[in-house]
């Protein structure tokens, strides 16, 4: 029993962002007040509905795990501890939270993290060393902050899509790019195909057919 637990609820990292609601306006958010209200509602659903919370938190961990893996830390230990923390009140719930108070939109997350930047793979694996150099050789404390911020940013991006254009749009763009990469499409082919599928449904067969037609 030399390893007691990967659950570290006494080592909590908090990432938070806030701004006036009107500052949320951008190309796909013409009505920032409506967007902020939908965003907060989406988070609230994940706070009370475990079926939604699982996918919601999975999106957060897409960002968290990427940095944890890149820096040679144990993502399985982090995953286990984080999901245990999400269930600490007896029901699985959202890791992130959002409010609108006095015209200020606030979005934050708290997760348990215990990471290192010395020893293990950090000094042995060349790509881990490179990743840490890209991050300006952070301390363990700084790395935990970077990981939490990445998870929060990932969650914001997902919720922004869900409450505006829908998550499917981004997924289909990625699907399209994967097909184009698979068939080694040229820059001109990519431009033409991207333009065409802005207003047409994307499927593997339809993309491949277009590539073949362009090359005839």
Image (spheres, rainbow, N blue to C red):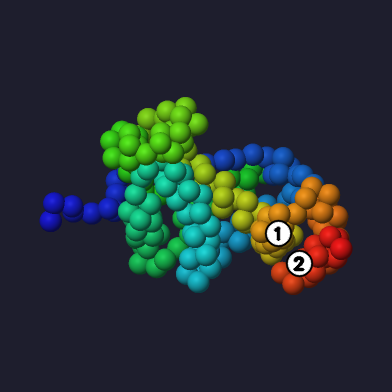
| 130 displayed left or right of 188 | left
Rendering coords of residue 193 (x, y %):
82, 58
Specify the farthest residue to the top.
136
Task: Label 2: state its secondary structure.
Answer: helix
Image quarter hosting the C terminus? bottom right
Residue 11 sits in which quadrant? top left
Rendering coords of residue 155 (x, y %):
56, 52
Identify the residue at horizontal 77%, vertical 44% (top origin). 26
Specify the farthest residue to the front.
216
| 121 displayed left or right of 99 | left
**Residue ID for mark 2:** 208
Q: Nearer the viewer, residue 192 or 27?
A: 192
Q: Is residue 12 visible?
A: no
Mark 1 in CB contact with mark 2 (< 8 angstroms): yes
Identify the residue at horizontal 38%, vertical 52% (top origin). 75
Mark 2 Cα within 10 Å, few/some/many (few <14, many 20+)?
A: some
Residue 204 sits in which quadrant? bottom right
Task: Label 1: state its secondary structure.
Answer: loop
Rendering coords of residue 88 (x, y %):
34, 60
Q: Is residue 103 visible?
A: yes
Numbered label attached to residue 183: 1
Q: Label 1 to label 2, Cα distance in Å?
A: 8 Å
| 90 displayed left or right of 147 | left
Which numbered disc, 1 or 2, marks the residue that appears first in the sequence? Answer: 1
Identify the residue at horizontal 37%, vertical 30% (top origin). 139
Name above or below for residue 137 compared with residue 181: above
């Amino acid at each position: 029993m030399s390893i007691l637990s990967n659950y570290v609820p006494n080592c909590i990292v908090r990432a938070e962002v806030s701004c006036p609601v009107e500052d949320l306006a951008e190309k796909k958010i013409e009505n920032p007040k409506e967007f902020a209200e939908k965003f907060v509602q989406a988070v609230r659903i994940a706070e009370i509905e475990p079926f939604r919370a699982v996918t919601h938190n999975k999106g957060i961990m897409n960002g968290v795990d990427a940095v944890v893996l890149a820096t040679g830390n144990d993502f399985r230990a982090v995953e286990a501890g984080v999901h245990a923390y999400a269930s600490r009140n007896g029901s699985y719930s959202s890791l992130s939270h959002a409010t609108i108070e006095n015209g200020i939109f606030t979005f934050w997350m708290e997760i348990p993290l215990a990471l290192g930047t010395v020893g293990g793979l950090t000094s042995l694996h060349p790509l881990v060393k490179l990743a840490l150099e890209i991050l300006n050789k952070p301390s363990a404390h700084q790395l935990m902050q970077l990981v939490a911020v990445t998870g929060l940013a990932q969650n914001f991006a997902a919720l922004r899509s869900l409450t505006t254009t829908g998550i499917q749009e981004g997924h289909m763009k990625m699907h399209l790019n994967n097909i184009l990469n698979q068939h080694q499409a040229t820059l001109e082919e990519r431009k033409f195909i991207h333009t065409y599928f802005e207003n047409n449904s994307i499927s593997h067969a339809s993309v491949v057919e277009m590539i073949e037609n362009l090359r005839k």
